[in-house]
Amino acid sequence: MALTFKKDEETEAQRGPMACPRPLSQCDPTSLPPGPPAGRWPLPLSRHQREMSSNREQRSAVFVILFALITILILYSSNSANEVFHYGSLRGRTRRPIDFKKWSITEGYVPLLGNKTLPSRCRQCVIVTSSSHLLGTKLGPEIERAECTIRMNDAPTTGYSADVGNKTTFRVVAHSSVFRVLRRPQEFVNRTPETVFIFWGPPDRMRKPQGSLVRVIQRAGLAFPNLEAYAVSPSRMRQFDDLFRGETGKDREKSHSWLSTGWFTMVIAVELCDHVHVYGMIPPDYCSQGSRAQRMPYHYYEPKGPDECVTYIQNEHSRKGNHHRFITEKRVFSSWAQLYGITFSHPSWT
């Protein structure tokens, strides 16, 4: 009896004060405490509920897979940011070289003042870049002896003629440099009245309804009757874009690239000249050389301006916004050297 009583006592203590005091088999079901609220017990799922649950699981799995793929693509893009143009592999394809000398001069360059035609032939031309590599070279007399001399944007000669000369046959000017050039007529117009200006820019910027750059240039022509100016035609601008795509395999707009004035100048020089010599342009691998420790300003006339190689590398590798692909352009120029008779010095590319 003692053992039985102890077992019943433990059972009653476990059941709580509202439980039946007798063994469960002897209790009246109506006297048992109420069970848990409805819905607490796991009920078997209907066929419709099972299908809905399965669909939810499938959607979750698809979402996880898509998230993983997007993450992998983002990581891949970040890791490949240093190689905007895989130029070496693109140049390996077979293609027919483009002969710029067959491009139409009259269709490519529109006169802005009068009805003149752009002078179409020089036997020997020099391109004088804006690089600080020209400082201290004393190349002025050599540059002066060239048949045709080509300069870019607002690179001055006053104060630098010992190194870069004064003679300017052509000056290729970007739309962004128009005002910098025209605001200094004594330097860029009166100093070398024989200069022929070639302005380039997107058609919508050159001839936009308000603030047309073409009208600005034409008004300057009224003040300076000797000014001779041409604009790169819209059709020729498309040819420049097509040329870039053909040489690099990249669409200029889709790759967020902006052709440099150096690109336009080089092509124009090949169009107009039998032989081209370039002063001051660095080779494409210059900025990757470990021995280059000296800081070189981007422009010879801006000694406190940005560093040349920093500017080139930042533009080459940037993906946001539009940037010049200086290094890629120089790789293209290197491939043109033998084909079009282009040589480079200060520094030499050989």
Image (spheres, rainbow, N blue to C red):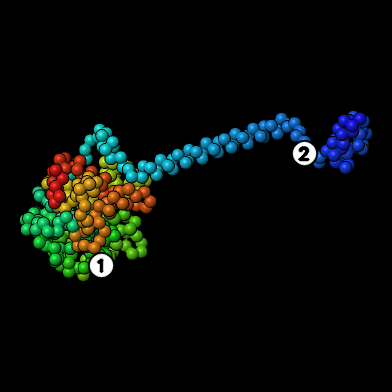
In the image, taking residue 261 as reference, residue 6 lies left or right, namely: right
User: Horizontal and vertical percent for residue 222?
Assistant: 22, 68
Camera-side residue: 254 or 86?
Answer: 86
- Which of the two discs, 1 and 2, labels the residue nearer the N terminus? 2
In this rendering, which labeled residue sits more in front, label 1 or label 2? 2
Q: Is residue 344 above or below residue 5?
A: below
Residue 208 seen in the figure: yes
Residue linked to disc 2: 40
Q: Quadrant of residue 26?
A: top right
Residue 281 pos. (x, y %):
18, 51
Residue 201 lies, in percent from the top left, at 29, 55
For residue 248, which quarter of the picture?
top left
**Quadrant of the image containing the C terminus:** top left
Task: State left or right for residue 73 relative to residue 350.
Answer: right
Q: Is residue 253 above or below residue 180?
A: above
Q: Residue 57, how many percent across, how many down? A: 61, 35
Q: For residue 211, which quarter of the picture?
A: bottom left
Give the secondary structure at mark 2.
loop
- Identified by mark 2, the residue type is Arg
Q: Residues within 10 Å of mark 2 (few under 14, many from 20)?
A: few
Residue 230 in view, yes or no:
no
The one nearer the camera, 323 or 167, is: 323
* Residue drawn at 36 percent across, 45 percent down: 81
**Which quadrant is home to the N terminus?**
top right
> Amino acid type of disc 1?
Arg
Residue at 57 percent of width and 35 percent of height: 61
Instruction: State the residue at coordinates (13%, 63%).
Output: 160
Is the residue marked by circle 1 packed among few (<14), some (14-19), or many (20+) residues within 10 Å?
A: few
Cα–Cα gap, marks 1 and 2: 88 Å
Q: Which residue is mark 1?
A: 219
Q: Circle 1 — which element?
A: helix
